[in-house]
Image (spheres, helix red, strand yellow):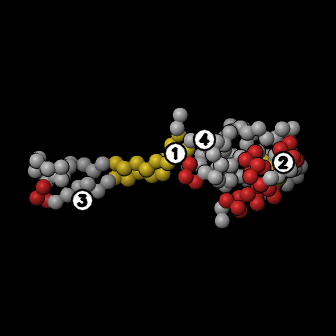
C-alpha cells in the first residue's frame, strides 16, 4: 500500500474569516461554524524508505538491499537490516566516525548509489565505502 509521512497539522481559520453578520444565517455556506477544522499535511512515501516521494532521488528502494553480496566490510555501508539506518562493520579500535540514514542519501540505498555513480565491483561485494557515501551525500544535499 501507499505510505504517508505527516508533515504537519494545524487548525484552519474558518471562523476567523467569517463575516459577523452571517454567523447565524443558515441559508448560506459562508456562515461561521462552532469549530475550526483540522488541516493535516501529508507526503507520500511509495517505497517506504522514510523519504517523501517529492524529495526521493531513488525510487523503488528495497530495504534490506542486495548489497553486500559477500559480507559487509569494515567502514563499508549498506542497508542490511530492516530499517532506514545504514549498517557498517566498524574497524577494531575507533569507529568510522560517520553515520548515514536514507534521509542523508535522499532515499538511496548503497546498491542504487553504486549504479548511479558507476562504482566498482568491490562496493557490490562489501558495501559502499566511506568516500562513496560522503561523495553521494554531498551530491544530493548541495
Q: Residues within 10 Å of mark 2 (few under 14, many from 20)?
A: many
Q: CA distance from mark 2 to mark 1?
A: 30 Å
**Number of marks present in the image shown:** 4
Q: CA distance from mark 4 to mark 3?
A: 40 Å
> At numbered mark 3, what does the secondary structure look like: helix, strand or loop?
loop
- Identity of the residue drawn at 55% across and 52% down: 54
- Identity of the residue drawn at 81% across and 58% down: 131
Q: Which residue is mark 2?
A: 123
Label of residue 16 in the image = 3
Q: Earlier in the sequence, mark 2 or mark 3?
A: 3
Q: Residues within 10 Å of mark 1 (few under 14, many from 20)?
A: some
Q: CA distance from mark 4 to mark 2?
A: 23 Å
Residue 136 location, x and y as percent?
73, 57
Q: Which residue is mark 4?
A: 47
Label of residue 26 in the image = none
Q: Are marks 1 and 3 in contact (CB under 8 Å)?
A: no
Q: Which of the two marks, 2 or 3, is nearer to us in this view? A: 2
Q: CA distance from mark 1 to mark 3?
A: 31 Å
| Residue 21 location, quadrant | bottom left
Amino acid at each position: 500500500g501507499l505510505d504517508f509521512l505527516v508533515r504537519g497539522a494545524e487548525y484552519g481559520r474558518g471562523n476567523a474569516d467569517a463575516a459577523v453578520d452571517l454567523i447565524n444565517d443558515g441559508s448560506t455556506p459562508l456562515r461561521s461554524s462552532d469549530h475550526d477544522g483540522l488541516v493535516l499535511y501529508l507526503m507520500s512515501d511509495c517505497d517506504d524508505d522514510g523519504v517523501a516521494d517529492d524529495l526521493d532521488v531513488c525510487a523503488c528502494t528495497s530495504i534490506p538491499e542486495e548489497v553486500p553480496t559477500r559480507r559487509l566490510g569494515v567502514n563499508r555501508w549498506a542497508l542490511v537490516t530492516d530499517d532506514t539506518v545504514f549498517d557498517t562493520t566498524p574497524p577494531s579500535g575507533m569507529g568510522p566516525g560517520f553515520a548515514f540514514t536514507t534521509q542523508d542519501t535522499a532515499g538511496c540505498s548503497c546498491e542504487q548509489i553504486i549504479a548511479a555513480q558507476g562504482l566498482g565491483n568491490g562496493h557490490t561485494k562489501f558495501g559502499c565505502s566511506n568516500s562513496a557515501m560522503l561523495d553521494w551525500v554531498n551530491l544530493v544535499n548541495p
